[in-house]
Image: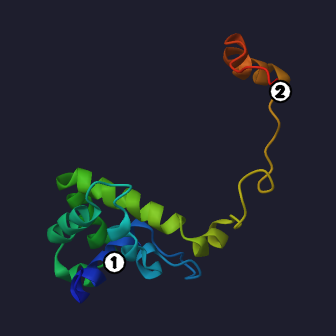
Amino acid sequence: MLNETNRAVLDAILDELIPPSEDGKIPGAGALGVADFLPTAQAYAPDPAGSVQTILDAVSDDFVALPRDEKVATLKRVEAAQGQDFETLVRLTYMGYYSRPDTRPYVGVGAHPIHPHGYPVDRESDAMMDELSAPVRARGKAYRDAK
């Protein structure tokens, strides 16, 4: 569980990884609350909380008050020193941000299935389908006829 200071620092880091739009209409990852996703991401990383804590330990508590160029420089140093944990944080930040249904309208993706009644999918050519299915057809019949 993060204390108030650590949460503010983490939100500031997340807002640097996925910043808000310049017009303020699209929130950054910190403002959107992606920090709440990170502890629940064990399915996507072995120790997400450990990676987050490693990054927080490498950043000072005054990170929130730094000018943007100093925040970026700080995060580049952390990335160089804590590469694996930083990569984990970046990946989970993107997953947490773009998996939220409320972010889909911001990027022009509707809340409908991808296929069959969602996005249009062009039909592959007959030659391509023959090529893709040739190994399956070459195996022969893999079932018994029903009586």
Is residue 15 toward the left or the right of residue 79 in the image?
A: right
Q: Residues within 10 Å of mark 2 (few under 14, many from 20)?
A: few
Residue at left offset 28%, top offset 54%: 46
Q: Which residue is mark 1?
A: 12
Check disc 1 and report its element: helix, strand or loop. helix
Query: Is tag 2's residue or tag 1's residue first in the polypeptide sequence?
Result: 1
Seen as rendered, the residue at the extreme bottom is 4
Q: In the image, residue 139 lies at what x, y percent?
A: 67, 12
Q: Residues within 10 Å of mark 1 (few under 14, many from 20)?
A: many
Q: In the image, residue 83 lies at what x, y percent?
A: 24, 51
* Quarter of the image with the C terminus in it: top right
Is residue 6 toward the left or the right of residue 129 in the image?
A: left
In which quarter of the view is residue 133 placed?
top right
Q: In the image, residue 102 lies at what x, y percent?
A: 60, 76
- Nearest the camera: 37 or 133? 133
* Residue 84 seen from this side: yes
* Quarter of the image with the N terminus in it: bottom left
Q: In the image, residue 145 lies at what x, y percent?
A: 79, 20
Q: Label 2 is placed on what type of residue?
A: Ser
* Residue 66 seen from this side: no
Check disc 2 and report its element: helix, strand or loop. loop
In which quarter of the view is residue 6 placed?
bottom left
Residue at left offset 25%, top offset 56%: 85
Residue at left offset 15%, top offset 70%: 57
- Nearest the camera: 146 or 93? 146
Cα separation, mark 2 vs mark 1, equals 49 Å
Q: Which residue is mark 2?
A: 125
